[in-house]
Image (cartoon, grey):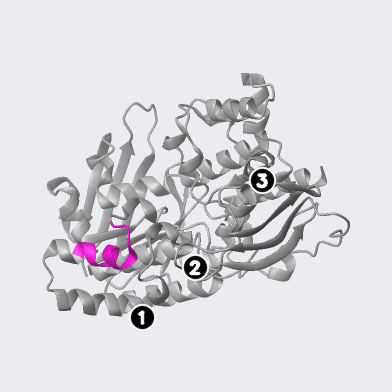
C-alpha cells in the first residue's frame, strides 16, 4: 500500500541560517495509520509539518534535499493549494487559519469556495457539530471562543473538506480531559476511514491506543522509532519528554494548606457577561491567597474570561476587585497583575528575544541592561536564543519567553493561561521550579 505521506532522506535549512533545521528524515505514513512525532521544543517537529504541507520551502524559502510526497505526488511539482487539498493541517494556533468571524461561517467557508451546494454544506456542518460537540458555539463569534473551542472548530473545518492525510500540531494543547479523550477516539475513527495521520505533540498518554508508531526527534534528527511501548520512563527522561502514563491529578495538584488570612487579590460580587449572552459569572466572590492556585474546568467554562477580568483586560458588569484589601480599578490591576496568554504571539513585539525581556524590565521600572535580562533568559533556558527574532521561535520557546516577560514585571499576582500547552517535559519541570520559587516570595 503506497504511503499518503512520505519523506525520503529529507534535509532542510531555512534561509539566512547556518545550520540544518532537520537532517536525513525518512518517514512513511500509510492509509489507516497514525504516527506520533515528539521531542523537546526546537527539535524540528514544526519544520517537519511545514515540509509535509509545503509551507517549507513554498512559503518560508530555504533549501531542501531528498524527496517529499503527499498522496504519491512530489510536493516539488505542486502548488500549496494542491497539496492542502490532499493534506489538511490543524496548526498549533488555529486562530491563524480562520477566515470568517462566525463559527458557522468558518465551517462553511471552504465548502462554499469549492462550490458545494447549500444543502450539502448544511449536512456537513450538522455532521461536524455532532462529531465535535460544537453545537452551543455555532452562532458565536470566533473571538468569543476559548482556545480549546477554537481548536475544535479548526479540526471540524479541516475534516469537513475530507483530505486524504491529516497533520495535527499539538492538538490537545488547550483541550480538557474529556475533549482529549474524544479526539483520540476521532483519530481511531479517521484511521478506519483510511486517513493517514501525523500527530506532533508533547502530551503523550492520550495517544496510547490511537497511534501505530512513535518517532522521537532530537536536534533535527530521528533519534528513536518504534511502537508506543518505547516511551518508557527511562526513555522519556533521556529525551526530556513528558510522562507517557496517565497523569495522577492527586499527585500533580497538592493541596494549599496556607490559604488563610487576607488574600492578595479578591473578587467582590463580580458579574460578567458577553454582549447578548447569559452571565459567565454571577455575583462571584472569592480570594486568591499567597502560593499557587489552580483553576480548572471544561473548555468554555470561563477560565480565560476569569484571567482577563483579574488582569483588568475585561471589566465586570457589576462588582469589582480588591488588591491587598484595597479597591482596584482596571489600570491598577494591569500594573500589578501579569498575565501569560494562551497565544504567546499576542505578547511579543520586539526584534529580538533579548529586546523583549529588556523592554519588559524597563516597563516595570527595573534596571534594563543586557546583564539584567540574561539571568531571566537563563532561568528559562533561552540564553542561546537571545539574538533570535521572537517570531522565529518554536511554540514552546515562545511560551517560555512570555513567562520570562511576566517574571520581569515582578508582579503581585501572575496568571498563566494554559502555561504547559506547548512545553516538553524538561521545560515543564523548569517552569514548575520557577513558579514554586516565585510563590515562596
Identify the mark nearer the N-term, 1 or 2.
Answer: 1
3D distance between C-alphas at marks 3 and 2:
51 Å
Q: Nearer the viewer, residue 412 or 392?
A: 412
Q: Secondary structure at mark 3?
A: loop
Q: Are the residues flagged by discs 3 and 2 in contact, CB closer than 8 Å?
A: no
- Residue appearing at x 66%, y 44% in the figure: 333
The residue under label 3 is 329
Characterize the local packing of mark 2: few (<14), some (14-19) or many (20 or more) Cα atoms within 10 angstroms: many
Residue 228 badge? 2
Identify the mark nearer the N-term, 3 or 2.
Answer: 2
1 vs 2, front mark: 1
Q: Is residue 89 left or right of residue 367?
A: left
Q: Is residue 376 magenta?
A: no
Q: Position of residue 410 (x, y in %)?
A: 71, 36
Q: Is residue 198 left or right of residue 227?
A: left
3 vs 2, front mark: 3
Over which residues does the magenta segment extend? Answer: 100-110
| Helix, strand or loop: magenta stretch | helix
Q: Are the residues flagged by discs 1 and 3 in contact, CB closer than 8 Å?
A: no
Q: Is residue 438 visible?
A: yes
Identify the mark nearer the N-term, 1 or 3.
Answer: 1
3D distance between C-alphas at marks 1 and 3:
43 Å
Q: Secondary structure at mark 2?
A: helix
The residue under label 1 is 130
Q: Nearer the viewer, residue 313 or 223?
A: 313
Q: Position of residue 110 (x, y in %)?
A: 21, 62
3D distance between C-alphas at marks 1 and 2:
30 Å
Q: Nearer the viewer, residue 64 or 122?
A: 122
Q: Is residue 42 visible?
A: no
Q: Position of residue 189 (x, y in %)?
A: 35, 78
Viewport quadrant of the N terminus: bottom left
Characterize the local packing of mark 3: few (<14), some (14-19) or many (20 or more) Cα atoms within 10 angstroms: some
Amino acid at each position: 500500500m503506497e504511503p499518503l505521506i512520505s519523506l525520503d532522506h529529507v534535509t532542510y535549512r531555512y534561509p539566512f541560517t547556518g545550520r540544518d533545521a532537520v537532517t536525513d528524515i525518512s518517514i512513511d505514513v500509510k492509509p489507516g495509520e497514525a504516527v506520533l512525532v515528539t521531542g523537546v521544543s526546537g527539535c524540528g517537529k514544526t519544520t517537519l509539518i511545514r515540509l509535509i504541507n509545503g509551507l517549507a520551502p513554498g512559503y518560508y524559502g530555504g533549501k531542501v534535499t531528498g524527496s517529499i510526497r503527499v498522496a504519491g505526488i512530489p510536493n516539488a511539482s505542486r502548488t500549496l493549494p494542491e497539496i492542502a487539498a490532499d493534506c489538511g493541517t490543524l496548526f498549533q494556533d488555529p486562530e491563524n487559519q480562520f477566515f470568517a468571524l462566525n463559527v458557522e461561517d468558518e465551517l462553511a467557508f471552504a465548502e462554499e469556495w469549492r462550490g458545494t451546494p447549500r444543502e450539502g454544506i448544511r449536512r456537513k456542518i450538522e455532521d461536524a457539530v455532532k462529531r465535535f460537540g460544537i453545537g452551543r458555539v455555532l452562532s458565536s463569534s470566533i473571538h468569543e471562543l476559548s482556545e480549546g473551542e477554537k481548536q475544535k472548530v479548526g479540526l471540524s473545518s479541516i475534516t469537513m473538506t475530507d483530505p486524504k492525510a491529516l497533520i495535527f500540531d499539538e492538538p490537545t494543547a488547550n483541550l480538557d480531559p474529556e475533549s482529549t479523550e474524544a479526539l483520540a477516539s476521532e483519530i481511531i475513527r479517521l484511521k478506519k476511514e483510511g486517513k493517514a495521520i501525523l500527530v506532533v505533540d508533547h502530551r503523550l498518554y492520550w495517544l496510547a491506543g490511537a497511534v501505530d508508531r512513535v518517532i522521537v526527534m532530537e536536534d533535527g534528527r530521528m533519534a528513536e522509532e518504534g511502537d508506543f511501548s518505547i516511551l518508557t520512563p527511562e526513555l522519556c527522561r533521556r529525551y526530556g519528554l513528558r510522562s507517557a502514563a496517565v497523569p495522577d491529578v492527586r499527585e500533580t495538584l497538592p493541596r494549599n494548606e496556607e490559604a488563610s488570612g487576607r488574600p492578595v487579590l479578591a473578587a467582590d460580587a463580580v458579574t460578567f457577561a458577553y454582549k447578548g449572552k447569559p452571565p459567565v459569572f454571577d455575583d462571584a466572590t472569592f480570594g486568591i491567597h499567597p502560593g499557587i492556585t489552580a483553576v480548572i474546568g471544561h473548555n468554555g467554562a470561563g477560565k480565560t474570561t476569569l484571567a482577563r477580568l483579574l488582569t483588568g483586560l475585561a471589566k465586570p458588569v457589576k462588582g469589582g476587585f480588591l488588591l491587598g484589601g484595597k479597591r482596584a480599578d482596571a489600570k491598577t490591576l494591569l500594573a500589578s497583575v501579569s498575565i501569560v496568554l494562551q497565544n504567546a504571539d499576542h505578547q511579543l513585539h520586539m526584534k529580538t528575544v533579548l529586546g523583549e525581556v529588556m523592554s519588559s524590565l524597563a516597563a516595570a521600572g527595573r534596571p534594563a541592561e543586557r546583564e539584567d535580562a540574561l539571568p531571566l533568559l537563563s532561568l528559562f533556558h533561552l540564553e542561546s536564543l537571545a539574538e533570535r527574532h521572537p517570531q522565529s521561535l518554536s511554540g514552546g520557546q515562545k511560551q517560555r519567553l512570555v513567562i520570562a516577560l511576566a517574571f520581569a514585571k515582578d508582579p503581585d499576582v501572575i496568571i498563566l493561561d494554559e502555561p504547559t500547552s506547548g512545553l516538553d517535559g524538561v521545560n515543564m519541570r523548569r517552569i514548575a521550579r520557577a513558579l514554586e520559587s516565585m510563590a515562596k516570595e
